Structures are given as C-alpha cells and as structure tokens.
Amino acid sequence: MSFGPARPLEQLFATRSSIKWRRYPADVLPVFVAEMDFDVDPAILDRVGETLRNSDTGYLDSAGPLAPAFARFARDSWGWEVVPERVHLATDVTVGVVEALRLAIPEVAGRVVLTPPVYPPFFEMVEEADAVAVTVPLIEESGWALDLAGIERAFADGADALLLCNPQNPTGRCHSRGALEALAALAARYGVFVVSDEVHAPLAHPGAVFTPFAPVAAAAGARSVTVTSASKAWNLAGLKCAVIVAADDWSARLLTRLPEELAARTSILGLHANVAALSCVKWRDSLLDLLVDNVRLLEAELAVHAPEVRVVQPDAGYLVWLDFRATGLGDDPARVLIDEGRVALNSGVPFGEPGRGFARINLACNPETVVEAVRRIAATVAAARGRVLLAG
Ligand SMILES: Cc1ncc(COP(=O)(O)O)c(C=O)c1O
C-alpha cells in the first residue's frame, strides 16, 4: 500500500481527462463529481499492467475470479456469506441496476420507489427500465432516515420495486439494521423486489456500522439483489466493472436470465482491477483516516467562516451534503457558488425535491483543497449576506 497526498491541482488539471477536470475552466475549483484526486493503489496498477502485458484483453463471460474475491471481502467486512455462483457481472453499477430492474418489473409502467434526496442517475435508471419513479423522501428530522410508513403506503399502492441506496448518496447515511429489517419485512409482505446499490459501502467510516441488505432480505423472505463495485472506494469508475449479487433463491433464478452480452460488455481490465482492489484494504483504511479528518476540517472551517452552512455528518464515503438554506443563496446554491465563488459543488436540485437549498461537496482531496473550497464558499455567502443588508 502507498496511499499518499494527491498531486498538486495544476498537475491534476494537466494530466486528467475526466469530467472533474474538464467540465469547468481551471479557475473553478472542482469539488463535485464522485471521483478522487488520489493516485490509484499501485497493486491495482500492477494487476491491470499484468493483464495488458499478457494481452488478456478479450471478452468476459462470467465473474470468474471476481466472484470468490467479492465473497471473501463481503464476509471479512460485513459477515455477509455470498454464494459465488450468485455473483454476476455488469458493465457498471448503473447498468447493473437497470438490468436487474428490467428482469423483475413489468415491461411497461412498472413502479419503482426512490427515496430522495438520492443520486440523480437513479431517476434516469428508472426511466431506462421503462418504469415510473414513486418518491418517498427520507425524513430529515430523523437524521435522513427511511420513511417506512411512506414506503409501506407506496408498496400497498402497487409499487413493483424499490431502489435502495445504502450508504445513501448524498447524505452518507448508513441505514440502520432496524430500518433495513423493517424494509425487508415490508418488501416480503407486499412482494416488492429490492435492488440495493451499495457502491459506497467499503467506505463506511470507522465507528459507523454498515449493514448489507442481502442477508437481512433473505432472512425476511424478501426478494433482492445487491449491485456494487470497487469503482467508488478505489476510484476505478473508468474501468467499467460491477457485480450484481442475488440475495435469495428466487433472485438467483432471476439473474440467470440476465442478457448474455452483459458480461461481454464488462471490461476485463475492470474485472482484474476489482479483484486487486478488494485486497487493497490498507490503502482503503488510510483513505478513510484522511476522509474522516477532512470531514472534521470542513466542519471546523465552515463553523468559523460560513456558520450558516450546515454539514450533514456522513457515516460513509467522501461526499458531504451541505445545507445552504440559511445562506440566502436560494434554491440552487451550487449555481451561485460556481458563477460567483468559482467553486464547483454538485447542485442539490437533481437529487429530488428535498435537494432544494442543498449542495454536495466531494472531500476525496487534499486538506488544502477543503480549506480553499470553504474560503470560496464563505466569500460567496458573505457577498449574499452583504446584498441582503444593502437591500434591507
Ligand atoms: C450511489 C451510486 N451508485 C452508482 C454510482 C456509479 O457507479 P458506476 O460508475 O459503477 O456506475 C455512483 C457514483 O457516484 C453512486 O454514488
């Protein structure tokens, strides 16, 4: 393992071609899309390099070595006993979610429950599966918990599936075991299929408890699959490989009907990168230490320079949900922050109705970048404060 500070920002702008470094001009500090500034673990580079050196660059037809590697990681991390034969490949997490939904819901006008604020592509994935989204917002007053009564109403009303985000993007919430057990019981009672996106799970912060949904679902007699990847925790999104894992016998049979091409559309380099990543636990642990420090730094800096901005304390991941409702920056603070502050966060608006007045910041960066982001946020908030005073 050799986790270290990210390269200087000028170098990242010069060497990286991904959205984070290309969407805005270089005077805009990019702390938006879920990509990390850090270098990939060298063990992953070695494995991908070896794959290339062997010209092992053809098509895949199964999860191969990734199935036992994922099963080992799930057992060691969360005590979840995965059956390797139930691990299937998908091009990425979003493709895996769409393919799983397509198999389980009616071909036209299926209804899928979403719990906003939630990762914006969830809305697109539901559309891609020719389904309609039914939204049951998280309960902010309960720490962004699942609204189980609302979910039961949606289930009783005929929902076909629920797309769970655990840990939740953008709030970073690890749903409690109790909430997941209650959700699984409801899913079993109403015959609703649950797809659990757990891509942020390897980044549960020290002290936080992440509960995988699959064993809870299986124990309750619910039907469920989990879709995940090393793409977030080890910054491998561009390598295109994810897994879909069946939680129960019914879902295991369902997944045998996945399109055959799905494995062939998954990158063989991505598969080897995922296998290597799942052993890179020390690199991940060093990253987690830095992320926890960055969250503390963000809170401390905001408390001094922009106390109107409130931090939703995450349990997992490197994305932090910021509440700007007391700042006077309006429904879409990220817009003003880019235009005036030259700092790019993700707008809260596409995360669904509860995202108004919020923005999401990415802390997978050096502490200096966090400090600079807060400086720019604070200047923008102060300018808005000044305008309010003048108007008054
Ligand atoms: C909850 C969630 N699911 C899926 C993804 C995308 O994963 P992938 O690139 O493997 O499709 C992200 C990316 O940020 C995410 O936050």
Image (spheres, rainbow, N blue to C red):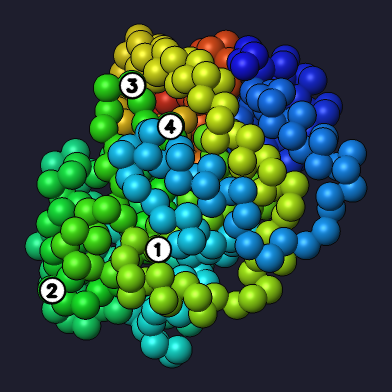
At label 3, counting other C-alpha atoms closer than 10 Å, the crowd grade (few under 14, some 14-19, many 20 or more) is few
Three-letter code, disc 4: Leu
Q: Which residue is mark 3?
A: 206
| Residue 111 or residue 236, whichever sits in front | 236
- Indicate left or right for 40 with 389 as reference: right
Residue at horizontal 33%, vertical 70%? 249
| Whole-number angstrom distance, CA of label 1 to CA of label 4 | 22 Å
- Residue 300: x percent and y percent? 35, 11
Residue at horizontal 77%, vertical 38%? 48
Residue at horizontal 33%, vertical 75%? 250
Q: Are marks 2 and 1 in contact (CB under 8 Å)?
A: no
Q: Which residue is mark 2?
A: 189
Where is 6 relative to 14, above or below? above
At label 2, counting other C-alpha atoms closer than 10 Å, the crowd grade (few under 14, some 14-19, many 20 or more) is some
Q: Which residue is mark 1?
A: 246
The numbered mark, 1 or 4, whose residue comes first in the sequence reads 4
Q: Quadrant of the C terminus?
A: top left
Q: Secondary structure at mark 1?
A: strand
| Whole-number angstrom distance, CA of label 1 to CA of label 3 | 28 Å
| Whole-number angstrom distance, CA of label 2 to CA of label 3 | 34 Å
- Indicate left or right for 258 with 26 as reference: left
The numbered mark, 2 or 3, whose residue comes first in the sequence reads 2
Q: Is mark 2 within 8 Å of ligand 1?
A: no
- Indicate left or right for 379 with 237 as reference: left
| Whole-number angstrom distance, CA of label 4 to CA of label 3 | 9 Å
Three-letter code, disc 3: Pro
